[in-house]
Structures are given as structure tokens and as C-alpha cells.
Amino acid sequence: MSIRIAGTVSDSITDGPGIRFTLFVQGCPHHCPGCHNPQTHDFNGGRDAEEEELIAAINKNPLLSGLTLSGGEPMCQARALAHFAERVRKECPRIKEVACYTGFTFEELLEGKADGAMELLKQLDTLVDGRFVQALRSWEIRFAGSSNQRVIDVPASLKAGKAVLDTSERWNG
Ligand code: SF4
């Protein structure tokens, strides 16, 4: 299954705790003013990448411990990314945690605003949700851009049927 991507970073320390492989997907419908990655908005931009290529790139870096899906809007390719994340969990033994950034809120995803979102949520440990709001920009929040965005414990949230925040030091310290 192919994924439309803007690019990858194979040793990110800014998209979650530890050293992470970050996949920036191409295409975003939200157009938040002040977005840091406007080049990822056009759904016709970027390039198609095959899962095999991405999995090989992940397994090349022995220092990785996490995968982060970012963008762009990962929830616009939720089914393809769910399939990819499931393979990463099986085929990339160093990846202990899968996180995702989304401009949708967790509640919007539960309401079905993004096709296939539930499939991707089931593959995630952590979701950082909500649009970037320039007026709420904060440099103090470690892994989010604006203070409306939440770090969500996805398995606990799916179990509870509502957003449960991840308050761990790793994500918030
Ligand atoms: S959701 Fe993210 S990528 Fe999309 S416009 Fe907002 S900040 Fe940019």
C-alpha cells in the first residue's frame, strides 16, 4: 500500500520523546494560519512512497525507539497509515511507540469526520490533537505547537470513549 508523503526525518528529537522516525504525509485540509509546514497542504504535492521503502529506512537506524506520523494531515490517509503502522509494529522491533499529530480533535475523529480514523487510532499509543492556533502558540509545551493541543493516551481513550490525557513526564516534562 502506498502513502502520499512530503518527506521523512530518520532521527527526530522534536516529534515526541526519544529518537523517532517522523513521516510527514502530504495533504492537509485545515490551513491553520501560521502553519510551519505549508508545503504539505497540497494533496497533489509530495510523492508516493511504498511501505517497504519506509520500513527499510526505519530499520536502518539502530537508535530509533518511536514512530511519529505528522504532516500534513495523517487522518486524511488513515487507512493506509493504519496498515503501515501495523506492519511497523511487526517488522520494526526497535519501534516501541507510535504517535500521530492531527488537526482534528479526538472528538471529531470519534464523530467520523475523517474516513478510517478508527482504524488508525487502534494502531496508536499517542495522539497530539487539534489545529495549530497562532494566538495560543507556546514554546513551553514540549511536543505541541499551541496550548489547545492535547497529548492523548489513545488506548485509554478508546477504552473510556472520551479523551484521556497522557500526563507522563516523557511527553510533558
Ligand atoms: S493541521 Fe498541521 S499541517 Fe495542517 S495546516 Fe494545521 S498546523 Fe499545518
Image (cartoon, helix red, strand yellow):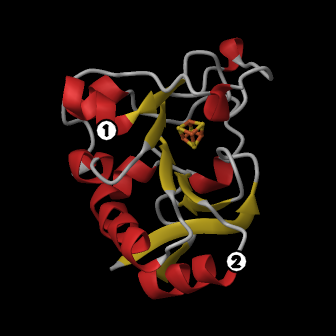
Q: Residue at x 56, y 51 (%)?
A: 71
Closer to the camera in the image, 31 or 52: 52
The answer to whether residue 130 is seen in the rendering is no
The answer to whether residue 50 is seen in the rendering is yes
User: Is 30 on the left or on the right of 61, as rendered?
Assistant: left
Relative to residue 17, is residue 98 depicted above or below?
below
C-alpha span from label 1 to label 2:
27 Å
Ligand 1: quadrant of the figure? top right
Label 1 beta carbon less than 8 Å to ligand 1: no
Closer to the camera in the image, 52 or 65: 65
User: Is 145 on the left or on the right of 79, as rendered?
Assistant: right
* Quarter of the rendering containing residue 144: top right
User: Is 148 on the left or on the right of 135, as rendered?
Assistant: left
Q: Residue at x 24, y 33 (%)?
A: 158
Q: Which mark is residue 61?
A: 2
- Tell me the element at label 2: loop
In x, y percent, where is residue 30? Answer: 48, 36
User: Is 42 on the left or on the right of 121, as rendered?
Assistant: right
Relative to residue 91, is residue 173 depicted above or below?
above
Q: Which mark is residue 103?
A: none
In x, y percent, where is residue 141? Answer: 71, 23
Q: Which residue is mark 1?
A: 155
Residue type at mark 2 is Asn
In x, y percent, where is residue 104? Answer: 40, 32
In x, y percent, where is residue 2? Answer: 39, 78
- Tell me the element at label 1: helix
Q: Residue at x 60, y 76 (%)?
A: 58
